[in-house]
Image: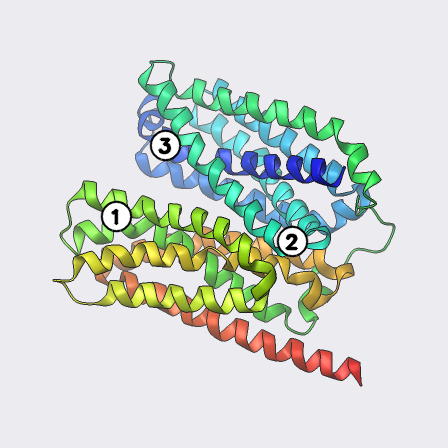
Amino acid sequence: MYSLLLAIIYIAFISLGLPDSLLGSGWPVMYGQLGVPISYAGIITMIIAGGTIVSSLMSDKMTRKLGAGLVTAISVAMTAAALFGFSVSRSFILLCIWAIPYGLGAGGVDAALNNYVALHYASRHMSWLHCFWGVGAAISPYIMGYCLTRGYGWSSGYRSVSILQIVLTAILFISLPLWKKNGSSNKTDAVSLSLRAAVRIKGVKLVLIAFFGYCALESTAGLWASSYLVEYRGIDSETAARFASLFFIGITFGRFISGFIAEKLGDKVLIRLGTVVIILGILMIIIPAGFDQLALAGLVVIGLGCAPVYPSIIHSTPANFGEENSQAIIGIQMASAYTGTTFMPPLFGFIADNINIGLYPVYLLVFAILMLTMTEWLNKVIAENSAFYSK
């Protein structure tokens, strides 16, 4: 039962990654047919991000009331319905309306499953879980591309993924007894932790800033890599696009490898090691023109460094702040993550337009140093708390 449920959770995280790449791969065709400017994709992503932040902050209350299994099933059902809504929409306004349940569902799955795995499974499974998210995010562009090249249109791309999500929703509802048999439904009558109370716990503010910094770095690195290589380094667009994609492959492959060493090294060491590797990769990019191959390799190194950080921060939450507080704190961490992902890449876009796109590695370095500072400070706070309570 334990292994079967874990397999279902892995599949659920593939489904979580599936919708994330659809808009980007379909938008070049969508915006023309909808009769809107290309920049309007940002409006849809902002609405989705807003929904994920709201549902992440509500995750503690919902999970305590309904249990992790039911919250996951309902959230995937909402995402499936939203994707189907996208497939039948013929106006930008309808896309914006369907983006609301789209974001709410995604945030619910993310927070509930991350906490569930952090509580009930070993660290290696958290790394592999997020590796499977990368698999989902990599598959969906191929689905959209197939539908577009075969003349089925972007609507068919969304419809295909919605069907996959509907099948998964059925599997999740059927599997609900497994969550209860494992004694891990997470349903409890205890009072949920308020946002104010959670943030006041020692060290929580530090991990929120660290998580914000990490997600700001990862999303900015991925979004602006090609533009930096082409506009500032003078590298041809095909080579730049290939190495930018290797950044994401580095994250996915790195998480697969991290799973094999996670138990031996532990979350704290993995976070520290990953952050140091990120900084090394950024320094490789900063090296002046004439060393373009080193800069290209630096993107891959940053991806490999990013790999263990996100899963390890999540997995360490119950140990750092207590199992009874982990769902609330992970929900807030998700909200902090989505905030960094949503607002920091556009901020760099403003910097690139008005100052210089060459500041790309410097911008990344600021967040990397912020991460390292906050996580090391957090380690010190947790150690002091443990020493205090052990007396």
Q: Judging from the image, what secondary structure is the residue with disc 3 in?
A: helix
Depicted 224 relative to depicted 371: above or below: above
Residue 144, quarter of picture: top left
Residue drawn at the location 24% of the way across and 66% of the way down: 286
Depicted 208 relative to depicted 346: above or below: below
Residue at the disc numbered 3: 25
> What crowding class fits label 2: few (fewer than 14 Cα within 10 Å), some (14-19), or many (20 or more)?
many
Give whichever of 157, 118 is nearer the camera. 118
Q: Going by the image, does 118 lie left or right of 343?
A: right
Residue at the disc numbered 1: 226
What amino acid type is highlighted by mark number 1? Answer: Ser
Q: Residue 86: image x %, image y %?
A: 49, 24
Choose mark 1 or mark 2, whichever is in front. Answer: 1
Q: Judging from the image, what secondary structure is the residue with disc 1 in?
A: helix
Q: Going by the image, does 33 lie left or right of 90?
A: left
Q: Going by the image, does 64 lie left or right of 265?
A: right
Q: Residue 236: image x %, image y %?
A: 15, 45
- Tell me the quarter of the image containing the N terminus: top right
Q: Residue 53: image x %, image y %?
A: 58, 49
Depicted 22 relative to depicted 282: above or below: above
Q: Is residue 363 visible?
A: no
Q: Judging from the image, what secondary structure is the residue with disc 2 in?
A: helix
Q: Which mark is residue 267?
A: none
Nearer-N-terminus badge (2/3): 3
What amino acid type is highlighted by mark number 2? Answer: Gly
What amino acid type is highlighted by mark number 3? Answer: Ser
Residue at the disc numbered 2: 331
Residue 390, quarter of picture: bottom right
Nearer-N-terminus badge (1/2): 1
> What crowding class fits label 1: few (fewer than 14 Cα within 10 Å), some (14-19), or many (20 or more)?
many
Residue drawn at the location 47% of the way across and 24% of the way down: 158
